[in-house]
Image (tube, helix red, strand yellow):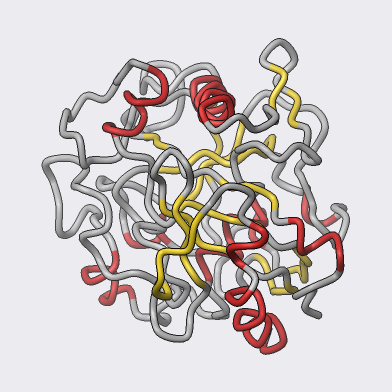
């Protein structure tokens, strides 16, 4: 973990070279954190170095959260949840129930999320990562995609091993998240709660976030230790991070939820009230040269 943190400084120095069309913002996302870049379509992303971390939780009693050491390669991740304004810019649509340009887009099906990733790639003239006929992801493509479950948790933890990136006490959620105990009316504009140590906002609460992975309770007892991408087959996809209607336990870094990819309506799936959004990632070429590989 400490090695991964040391890799941050090196990756910040080469962010502009690796961004493939991104530009440096001129300031770090937060003191001591990776550097933020702005994409051609105007989205702020953060470059995270590759590294190893303990995924899951020894504190939780959930079978699907059994701790295991995972290594991920370097990647860019959206600093904020995708807003309704940007979703409309890319797709021409906004399915959100709680309309506000600065709010995260919500009521997004997994199939909508991957279509948005492809459309965002086309907007920036990048190769598309998804085959929309088969739902398969090309992880070697330079375009946008949904984070793997391992990438999402790595980003949410920001180098920490506690239940939340700010510690074990859920009282700290009030500063970092919109959730059941401080918001009852719906999602709020992105970036209004405190960022984690790597400059990422709303990793907890506001809206659930889709991951690329198919869900399996026991997957991480048998997954590859490096860049796991989820099972090859299954009927449900992973959600992470909790939403504005979530209890503190559902906002933990390791908490896992699964949902039917074609539906976000509560009538068809679990009680997520349809409040599901998007945060995109994009592979960083530095991981293929071994930089910031962690260990």
In the image, residue 254 above or below residue 80: below
What residue is rendered at 44% in x and 53% in y? Answer: 38
| Residue 87 picture quarter | top left
Q: Check the image and name the residue furthest to the left.
A: 185
Q: Is residue 103 above or below residue 70?
A: above
**Percent from the top left, x then y, of residue 77?**
54, 54
Along the horizontal axis of the image, is 81 left or right of 240? left
Query: Which of 252/95 is in front?
Result: 95
**Residue at x 47% of width, y 73% of height:** 198
Question: Which one is in front, 9 or 150?
Answer: 9
As drawn, is 183 to the left or to the right of 96? left
Q: Position of residue 6 (x, y in %)?
A: 66, 87
In this figure, what is the number of numbered marks?
0
Viewer-closest of 208 and 51: 51
Q: In the drawing, does residue 234 fall left or right of residue 25? A: right
Q: Residue furthest top?
A: 133
Q: Position of residue 209 (x, y in %)?
A: 46, 43
Q: Residue at x 42, y 82 (%)?
A: 167
x and y percent of residue 232 in the render?
Answer: 82, 32
Please give the name of the residue rendered at 59% of the width and 40% of the height, measured from the top-left corner.
146
């Amino acid at each position: 973990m400490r090695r991964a943190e040391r890799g941050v400084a090196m990756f910040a120095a080469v962010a502009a070279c690796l961004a493939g069309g991104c530009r440096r913002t001129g300031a770090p996302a937060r003191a001591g954190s990776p550097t933020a870049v702005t994409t051609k379509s105007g989205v702020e992303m953060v470059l995270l170095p590759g590294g190893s971390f303990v995924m899951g939780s020894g504190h939780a009693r959930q079978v699907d959260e059994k701790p295991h050491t995972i290594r991920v390669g370097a990647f860019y991740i959206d600093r904020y949840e995708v807003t309704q304004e940007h979703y409309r810019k890319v797709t021409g649509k906004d399915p959100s129930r709680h309309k506000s340009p600065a709010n995260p887009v919500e009521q997004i099906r997994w199939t909508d999320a991957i279509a948005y990733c492809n459309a965002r790639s086309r907007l920036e003239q990048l190769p598309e990562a998804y085959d929309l006929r088969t739902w398969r992801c090309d992880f070697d493509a330079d375009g946008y995609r949904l984070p793997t479950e391992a990438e999402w948790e790595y980003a949410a933890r920001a180098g920490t091993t506690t239940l939340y990136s700010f510690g074990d006490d859920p009282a700290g959620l009030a500063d970092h998240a919109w959730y059941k105990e401080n918001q009852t009316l719906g999602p709020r504009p992105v970036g209004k709660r405190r960022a984690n140590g790597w400059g990422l906002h709303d990793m907890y609460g506001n809206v659930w976030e889709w991951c690329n992975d198919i869900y399996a309770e026991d997957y991480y007892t048998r997954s590859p230790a490096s860049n796991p991408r989820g099972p090859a087959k299954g009927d449900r996809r992973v959600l992470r991070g909790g939403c504005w209607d979530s209890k503190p336990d559902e906002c933990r870094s390791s908490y896992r939820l699964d949902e039917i990819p074609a539906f976000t309506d509560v009538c068809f799936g679990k009680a997520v009230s349809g409040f599901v959004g998007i945060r995109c990632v994009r592979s960083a070429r530095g991981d293929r040269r071994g930089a910031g590989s962690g260990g």
